[in-house]
Amino acid sequence: MDYAIARERMVQNQLVARKITNEKVLEAMRTVPRHEFVPKELWGRAYGDHPLPIGQSQTISQPYMVALMTQQLQLEKTNKVLEIGTGSGYQAAILAELVRRVFSVERVPELSSRARKVLDGLGYGNVIIKTGDGTLGWKEFAPFDRIVVTAGAPDVPSALVEQLVDGGRIVLPIGNTYVQTLLVVKKKGKKIERKEVCGCTFVPLIGEQGWENG
């Protein structure tokens, strides 16, 4: 398979056709080798219009959802971004193409270790990963200009709002453990504004300010 051709087809048929218009996001999606972030036996399906399993009951999100969430963040090159739910590391790589520094928290040690190896192998030195409870954010490096959550939460974790700069935004799915609504949350002083984007389905966000494990 010619993966560069597969990526271009993915961008045109799945992203441009669905109104992903940010040229920098589209270029990042063209650049990052998505197949490197899934098990080798799934490389042939890596650019399909669907999520894929990555082990530990987790998934790599559908390409369109990755692009949509990234576009909704309205990133600037100087941004410091916090990602909750490293998973395969693919979303972190897309972010790393677009911003100065990415901090990513993953609660499953096996996934954070594997993502680190893949990201290092591809030269993404501007991604910092730790294993821990992502619902509590990463206080040591706060505040963040943008935060993206790649798992479904019952509500917006207050810890993440506290670690967001004034004027910053969080993109995350909110709902039950089966279906959610993708939200853009903007912080303005002590208030937050919420905008609904679309329906979606993510694995549950487990943690102190998320869902209980099991």
Image (tube, helix red, strand yellow):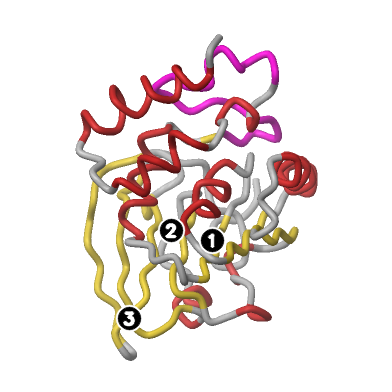
Which range of residues does the magenta coloring cover?
40-59
Question: Do labels 1 and 2 touch, CB within 8 Å?
Answer: yes
The tag on residue 167 is: 3
Q: Which residue is rendered at x = 67% and y = 63% of the image?
A: 133
The residues tagged by marks 1 and 2 sit, at their Cα atoms, a distance apart of 6 Å
The residues tagged by marks 1 and 3 sit, at their Cα atoms, a distance apart of 24 Å
> Could you tell which of marks 3 and 2 lies nearer the N-terminus?
2
Question: Does dot 3 land on a helix, a strand or a loop?
Answer: strand
Q: Which residue is rendered at x = 55% and y = 56% of the image?
A: 211
Position of residue 190 relative to residue 124, above or below, is below
- Labels 1, 3: front one: 3
Amino acid type assigned to the residue bearing label 3 in the image: Gly
Relative image position of residue 68 (x, y in whole percent): 33, 45
Amino acid type assigned to the residue bearing label 1 in the image: Gly
Quarter of the image that includes the C terminus: top right
Position of residue 183 relative to residue 38, above or below, is below
Tell me the residue that label 2 is attached to. 154
Relative image position of residue 177 (x, y in whole percent): 46, 44
Q: Is residue 196 magenta?
A: no
92 relative to 174 in the view: left or right:
right
Tell me the residue that label 1 is attached to. 210
